[in-house]
Image (cartoon, rainbow, N blue to C red):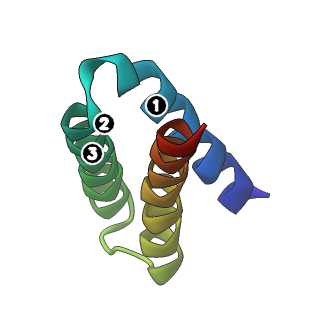
Amino acid sequence: MQALFHVIAGVLIAGFLMPEGPVVVILGLAVVALMKAVYSYLDTGRLALTQVGYLGLLLAGGVLYMLYRLFF
């Protein structure tokens, strides 16, 4: 369930930033993923493998949205 929320969050962030351009979307998602990783590391003292997977799903959601906008 948490994985699905990360994909949906990536889609929503990409949808919000898409009018600015695809480079801004990628940079925005990268910043969000980086800040989430830093917060997780500072909170627990380590970066869990599941968190890395969730960050990948966040970026994948943004890429899926951009591919959707490209073809439809």
Amino acid of disc 2:
Val
Q: Which mark is residue 48?
A: none
Tell me, yes or no, whether the two marked residues, 2 and 1, touch with CB atoms within 8 Å.
yes
Residue bearing mark 1: 13
Q: Give the distance between the C-alpha atoms of the residues marked 3 and 1, in whole angstroms.
A: 10 Å
Would residue 55 be found to the left or right of residue 12 on screen? left
Q: Which mark is residue 26?
A: 3
Q: Residues within 10 Å of mark 3 (few under 14, many from 20)?
A: some
Q: Position of residue 28 (x, y in %)?
A: 26, 36
Q: Quick one: 20 or 4, which is closer to the camera?
A: 20
The residue sitting at 27% across, 45% down in the picture is 26
Q: Position of residue 5 (x, y in %)?
A: 68, 47
Q: Earlier in the sequence, mark 3 or mark 1?
A: 1
Would residue 42 be found to the left or right of residue 53 on screen? left
Q: Earlier in the sequence, mark 2 or mark 1?
A: 1
The quadrant holding residue 56 is bottom left
Q: Secondary structure at mark 2?
A: helix
The residue sitting at 45% across, 20% down in the picture is 16
Q: Position of residue 54 (x, y in %)?
A: 52, 64
Q: Which mark is residue 25?
A: 2
Tell me, yes or no, whether the two marked residues, 3 and 2, touch with CB atoms within 8 Å.
yes
Amino acid of disc 1:
Ile
Q: Quick one: 8 or 66, which is closer to the camera?
A: 66
The residue sitting at 44% across, 34% down in the picture is 14
Q: Position of residue 61 (x, y in %)?
A: 54, 51
Q: Quadrant of the C terminus?
A: top right
Q: Give the distance between the C-alpha atoms of the residues marked 2 and 1, in whole angstroms.
A: 8 Å
User: Quick check: 72 above or below 5?
Assistant: above
Amino acid of disc 3:
Ile
The residue sitting at 44% across, 77% down in the picture is 48
Q: Secondary structure at mark 3?
A: helix
